[in-house]
Image (tube, rainbow, N blue to C red):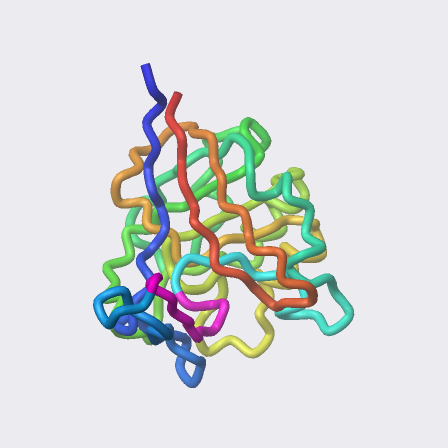
């Protein structure tokens, strides 16, 4: 029996809202078979923070590593999908009090935030600094969330980003967990090998064996 694969990535289209002022996704065709060419060939332009993506520590700390230097074991391995109750403004430690955070050491948070992905939200559920400290101290390898950012959209300090970076925790933003019930899965969400980059798009999937 083949394992079930659940795609938890958001589609990249020109309608996908970027961070305000950031570069949206666009695609142009260089050659088309329909026009007599031998192949279809295209190019695209986008910020690496559009859609489902992995930030690098360099995104928030000038002296930190780019996305090509983040250990790949952060992005592949067993992960737990958890629904955060009550659609809170922030995820706090109490929301995961019932779980052993290291079994498995990756956590994907379904916040219940109702988002129109053609419009960047003014606010959405984020991680509280206390929650970021909790997972860093527990030895969690990765935290993912189904909203565009782990910090408030108007934050200048970006505390959750910096606390996770300092604790060696990777993070994914803008997941689509609609079709992934709570439970444990095998996660694969590998970033592209872009030396020195502040982020990378990922094709995130869950495998239920």
User: Which residue appears at 32% of the width and 14% of the height?
Assistant: 1
Vertical arrangement, residue 130 with respect to residue 45, above or below: above
Residue 146 drawn at (x, y percent): 37, 53
User: Which residue appears at 73% of the width and 62% of the height?
Assistant: 65
- Quarter of image, res 182: top left
Magenta-colored span: 38-50
Vertical arrangement, residue 149 with respect to residue 109, above or below: below
Quadrant placement of the C terminus: top left
Residue 105 drawn at (x, y percent): 58, 34
User: Looking at this rendering, what residue extends furthest in the right direction?
Assistant: 63
User: Which residue appears at 34% of the width and 42% of the height?
Assistant: 7
Dominant SS of magenta comes to loop
Tell me if 125 is positioned left or right of 74 in this view.
Answer: left
Residue 27 in sight: no
Residue 122 drawn at (x, y percent): 33, 76
> Is residue 45 one of those drawn in magenta?
yes
Figure label count: 0
- Quarter of image, res 178: top left
């Amino acid at each position: 029996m083949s394992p079930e694969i659940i795609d938890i990535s958001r589609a990249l289209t020109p309608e996908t809202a970027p961070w305000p002022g950031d570069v949206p996704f666009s695609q142009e065709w260089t050659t088309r078979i329909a026009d007599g060419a031998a192949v279809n060939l295209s190019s695209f332009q986008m910020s690496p923070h559009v859609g489902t993506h992995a930030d690098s520590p360099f995104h928030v700390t000038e002296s930190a590593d780019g996305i090509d230097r983040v250990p790949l074991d952060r992005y592949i391995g067993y992960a737990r999908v958890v629904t955060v109750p009550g659609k809170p403004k922030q995820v706090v430690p109490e929301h995961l009090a019932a779980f052993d955070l290291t079994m498995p050491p990756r956590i994907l948070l379904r916040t219940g935030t109702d988002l129109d992905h053609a419009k960047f939200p003014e606010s959405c559920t984020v991680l509280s600094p206390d929650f970021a400290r909790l997972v860093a101290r527990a030895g969690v390898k990765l935290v993912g969330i189904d909203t565009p950012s782990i910090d408030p959209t108007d934050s200048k300090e970006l505390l959750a980003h910096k606390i996770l970076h300092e604790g060696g925790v990777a993070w994914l933003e803008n997941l689509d967990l609609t079709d992934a019930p709570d439970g444990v899965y095998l996660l694969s969400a590998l970033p592209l090998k872009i030396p020195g980059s502040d982020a990378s798009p990922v094709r995130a999937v869950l495998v239920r064996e």
